[in-house]
Amino acid sequence: MTTDVHYGHIFHLKGSPTVTEAAAALVSVPDGALVVGSDGRVLFAGERAAVPAEYASATVHDQRGGYLLPGFVDTHIHFPQTYAGDSYGGGQLLEWLTNCIFPSESSYAEPEFAQEAAVEFTRRRIAAGTTAAMVFGSAFPHAQDALFSQTQKAGLRIVSGRGIQTRGPASAEPLITSEEDAIRLTREEIEKWHAADTGDVNTALLHVAIVPRFSLAVTTETLRNLGELYDEFRDRGVYVHTHLNENNRPGTGEVDSTKREYQVDTYLDTYDGKFLPGSQVGGKSLLGPRTILAHCVHCQDAELARMAETGASIAHCPVSQLFLGSGTMPWKRTIASGVNVAAGTDFGGGDEWLVPRVLGDAFKQHISEDGAAGVSLHPAELLFLGTLGGARALDMEDRFGNFDEGKEADFVVVQPAGALKGLLRNAVRAGDAGLARDQTLFALLMGLRESSIAEVYVRGRRVVA
Ligand code: GUN
Ligand code: ZN
């Protein structure tokens, strides 16, 4: 590879801000240049006129009129739901799972179908500019093989693991394994795919997660065994991914059912080794900086504090919350706990593949929270959720998430098409330069659709379907 320079309007968050510090870290360079070295790392990001002379011979990619953004990070998306978006289940989470999702995921038992889904799932991520993702995987190892293979072929980043279920309703039967197989298959997946591309977790694009579907889909024995397994692999950079506090329908919803069945004080306790009645310790914790908990709409303060303490992150999925009637994650209270929050599409619980569509719904949800809880999220905070916060949730902020010099160059080129073109041309109403910048970024994130994602790069290399 040669040294390349991409011209365009750069937006990114420099340094390592928290979400509340994002506005101060926002960088906007309308006539910008992003120089990427032959090793795929950022050599320079700044004014086009200030590109150091040593890069004068770099190959020019003139994207002016367009925007250069860090690649989008989707911290929660379901591979076995590739064809399950917009499924009508006649109810909220648990009915939808039983009536739509478990049957849909069962069709991945057929290898050809799983292969076709892996191709489509990869195509959709590229079309959406999703350069890295935490992918909730299929129960079937051949489907996971197809997912990792296709992802590697395309050159995208992924963390994924087979969805583990050891109990459930009749419709989930094809997805359920014995206790022994749950552990054996997870171990085999780690051994086969974790850092399989480079052999080094610090340079790999492929990573494996331990993925118990949620506490209602596993037993205390599974949780104990997974705690042991995680203890064995934690130091090798293996991840944990699951769902937490999504549906709080009184009595029969996910949160109440979990607390009733496990007799625990908090839902989080079940993932924290405290899954025995009275939240007594029964095994090792699954929490840590490589743990991502999806949804977290109905957390107690103690749960938020514990996630912050352990370095776990929340995958915030407002598109899904709307689709499944799961409610609104309280923004201010959640952020005040110090826990890292990033965006997740939750496709097919959400019906959008594009991370900026999640950011748009986050804005609409949180400005609509009651009274003093309501907040107008700053466009830089939205950008954080979709880029740097995601890299932090994946515990790979040192590698990507912004254009700081030395980072691996993951980025999307946005060439405004259709309605977005006119929107951006007329987005600025402010005389004040700072507000004008914010208005441009806001219109870009809110109005972006797949049709405007022109090119996608991971580690400086163009990704194509
Ligand atoms: N909880 C357990 N499984 C699922 C799932 O597939 N989607 C969502 N949104 N929540 C879940
Ligand atoms: Zn989910």
Image: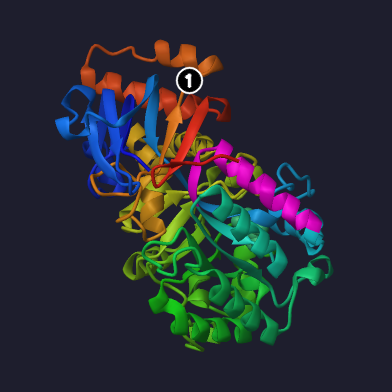
Looking at the rendering, the quadrant in which ligand 1 lies is bottom right
Under 8 Å from ligand 2: the CB of mark 1?
A: no
Q: Which residues are magenta?
A: 112-132
In this rendering, the answer to whether 376 lies above or below 323 is above
In the displayed structure, does residue 11 sit left or right of residue 101? left
Can you see residue 171?
yes
Q: Nearer the viewer, residue 224 or 61?
A: 61
Amino acid at circle 1:
Pro
Q: Main secondary structure of the magenta part?
A: helix
Which residue is drawn at the image coordinates 64% and 83% (left, top)?
184
Q: Secondary structure at mark 1?
A: loop
Residue at numbered disc 1: 416
Can you see residue 324?
no
Indicate the position of residue 74 as horizontal and vertical percent values. Answer: 50, 48
In this rendering, the answer to whether 462 lies above or below 227 is above
Q: Nearer the viewer, residue 430 or 173?
A: 173
Circle 1 Cα neighbour tier, 10 Å, few/some/many (<14 / 14–19 / ≥20): many
Which residue is drawn at the image coordinates 62% and 41% (left, top)?
124
Q: Nearer the viewer, residue 4 or 189?
A: 4
Indicate the position of residue 405 as horizontal and vertical percent values. Answer: 23, 45
Indicate the position of residue 324 as horizontal and vertical percent values. Answer: 66, 47
In which quadrant will I find the N terminus?
A: top left
Asked whether residue 116 is drawn in magenta, I would say yes
